[in-house]
Image: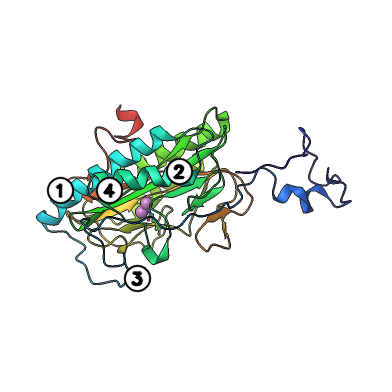
């Protein structure tokens, strides 16, 4: 994060002349960058020791999809329970390390080592060429922020998205954390985003269409006048990081796939204070809101059971162990 050295403490209205003396309207001048997250320097890719089992894309960065069953075998499910637990623990530890002054690159180093200590490969690393082991998305960054030299600032919110590959399967989970003292508007956004995820999880029922999930999420977000990001969606997961199942976070009648016991997918709503549309940074990964307003996200990996959902990245020790209204 960077700020501008000689910016005044009270900012002009949108159509006032810019404080910098350019003679241009504030909205056409410094408003575009003030308070926004700016890219920092990205350090070299971190190595993973030889003894750790790698997913097929680890060496080349190329992802070659294959036809993976949507309904998992009991053996795959058991391994996904373990991968989910490992990812959940790493996410909790990473969140506990968040503090003002820490760079997201330092956070990446810490998280990278946590995966390796547990015998897991950091799934993001070299996935379609992604250069780091965790995604760190600050303030208006919707998702896929790349850890870099920027220090976290008091008042920021940061989403950490942890995915680990262990036992031949992936576990994928994320949560949004507060950096120091955070304003009440952001607190509310983060709280409601977590609630949105749980409303989505509670809509998981065998025999029902997958569109029920998005309908539940969208309804809750709308009640709070928040936006729902549409461009990034939940996904099938298992031996591959992303499989063909699509989980929209808003209602779409075309999401007619019927949920079946043994299916595994993620639910990962991104909720915004303002615009739900995104713009991409030049790095082609970092997605930010078009208006620069804040956005939050939570994610769990879910197994459809005979009567509902099992949260493979939830339970004791998880950042979001169960629905807030059940605890
Ligand atoms: N973990 C993200 C998800 O929830 C995907 C990150 S892909 C990466 O789907 F390449 F950016 F790591
Ligand atoms: Co994720
Ligand atoms: Co995911």
Which tag, 2 or 1, sits closer to the chain's start?
2
Say whether mark 1 is within 8 Å of ligand 3.
no
According to the picture, the residue beneath numbered tag 3 turns out to be: 60
Could you give the CA–CA distance between mark 2 and mark 4, rounded to whole angstroms? 16 Å
Foreground pick, 297 / 280: 280
Other residues around mark 4 within 10 Å, as few (<14) / some (14–19) / many (≥20): some
The reply to whether residue 164 is in sight is yes
**Which element type, helix, strand or loop, lies under badge 1?**
loop
Corner quadrant of residue 201: top left
The x, y position of residue 86, in whole percent, is: 25, 44
Disc number at residue 106? 2
The x, y position of residue 224, in whole percent, is: 52, 38
Look at the numbered discs 2 and 1 and tell me whether their residues touch, using CB distance below 8 Å. no
Which tag, 3 or 1, sits closer to the chain's start?
3
Q: Say if 195 sits above or below 282 in the image.
A: above
Disc number at residue 116? 4
Q: Is residue 20 left or right of residue 291?
A: right
Look at the numbered discs 2 and 4 and tell me whether their residues touch, using CB distance below 8 Å. no
Could you give the CA–CA distance between mark 3 and mark 2, rounded to whole angstroms? 25 Å
**Which element type, helix, strand or loop, lies under badge 2?**
helix
Quadrant where the C terminus is found in the figure: top left
The x, y position of residue 209, in whole percent, is: 29, 57
Could you give the CA–CA distance between mark 1 and mark 4, rounded to whole angstroms? 34 Å
According to the picture, the residue beneath numbered tag 1 turns out to be: 306
Query: Residue at image x 32%, y 45%?
Result: 113
Look at the numbered discs 3 and 1 and tell me whether their residues touch, using CB distance below 8 Å. no
């Amino acid at each position: 994060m960077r700020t501008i050295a000689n910016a005044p403490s009270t900012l002009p209205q949108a159509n006032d002349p810019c404080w910098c003396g350019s003679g241009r309207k504030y909205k056409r001048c410094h408003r575009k960058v003030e308070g926004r997250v700016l890219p920092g320097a990205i350090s070299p890719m971190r190595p993973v020791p030889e003894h750790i089992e790698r997913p097929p894309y680890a060496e080349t960065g190329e992802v070659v999809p294959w036809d993976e069953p949507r309904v998992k075998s009991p053996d795959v499910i058991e391994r996904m329970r373990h991968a989910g637990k490992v990812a959940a623990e790493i996410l909790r530890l990473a969140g506990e390390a968040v503090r003002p002054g820490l760079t997201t690159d330092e956070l990446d180093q810490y998280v990278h080592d946590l995966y390796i200590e547990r015998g897991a490969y950091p799934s993001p690393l070299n996935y379609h060429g992604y250069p780091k082991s965790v995604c760190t998305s600050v303030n208006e960054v919707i998702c896929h922020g790349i850890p870099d030299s920027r220090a976290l600032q008091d008042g920021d919110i940061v989403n950490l998205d942890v995915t680990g590959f262990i036992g031949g399967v992936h576990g994928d989970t994320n949560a949004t954390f507060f950096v120091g003292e955070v304003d009440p508007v952001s607190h509310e956004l983060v709280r409601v985003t977590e609630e949105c995820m749980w409303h989505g999880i509670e809509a998981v029922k065998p025999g029902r269409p997958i569109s029920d999930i998005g309908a539940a999420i969208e309804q809750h977000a709308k009640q709070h006048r928040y936006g729902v990001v549409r461009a990034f969606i939940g996904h099938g997961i298992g031996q591959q990081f992303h499989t063909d199942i699509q989980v929209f976070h808003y209602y779409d009648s075309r999401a007619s796939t019927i949920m079946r016991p043994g299916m595994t997918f993620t639910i990962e709503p991104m909720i915004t204070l303002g615009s739900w549309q995104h713009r991409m940074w030049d790095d082609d990964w970092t997605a930010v809101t078009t208006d620069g307003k804040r956005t939050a996200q939570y994610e769990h990996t879910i197994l459809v059971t005979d009567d509902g959902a099992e949260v493979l990245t939830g339970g004791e020790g998880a950042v979001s162990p169960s629905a807030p209204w059940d605890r």
